[in-house]
Image: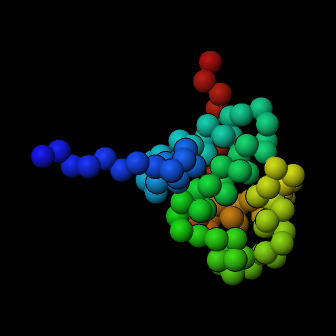
Amino acid sequence: MAPKKRIYRNLQELILKNLHDPKEATAYLKAALADEDERVFLLALRDVLEARGGSISDLAEKTNLNKQNLYRMLSKEGNPRLSSLKTVLHAIEFQIDINPIKK
């Protein structure tokens, strides 16, 4: 008898399940960063945080950043400073990596 497949309630639930895998989360963040709209990356970052079982409150405690500022930073209206972005990425075990454009 074949194992029963899990049925997800919505796409977001499936995305969050897949983002548990660091390779999937990395690819997701890189794809979001490549988008013309900078807000896409901030929302993707929030998805990765959620997938890893974290909340904004947990993140605020771990990073010593203000909870309200984190909510705003990881929203469609977010405009974080680079230092704040690096702090958040480090807290969820990621880092910024710069590479030359492939031609």
Is any part of residue 74 visible from this angle? yes
* In the image: residue 18, left or right of residue 58: left
Where is residue 60 drawn, in percent x and y? 72, 76
Counting the numbered discs, the total is: 0
Where is residue 82 drawn, in percent x and y? 80, 57
Q: Looking at the image, which is closer to me, 29 or 101?
A: 29
Residue located at (65% from left, 49% from top):
44
Q: How is the image coloured?
A: rainbow
Where is residue 93 drawn, in percent x and y? 55, 63
Where is residue 26 drawn, in percent x and y? 53, 47
**Quadrant for the C terminus in the image:** top right
Residue located at (55% from left, 44% from top):
11
Residue farthest along the top direction in this orientation: 103
Q: Looking at the image, which is closer to me, 82 or 35?
A: 35
Q: Looking at the image, which is closer to me, 9 or 90?
A: 9
* In the image: residue 73, left or right of residue 101: right
Residue located at (70% from left, 77% from top):
57
Q: Is residue 27 shown above or below 22?
A: above
Is any part of residue 82 visible from this angle? no
Q: Quadrant of residue 51?
A: bottom right
* In the image: residue 38, left or right of residue 57: right
Residue located at (69% from left, 81% from top):
61
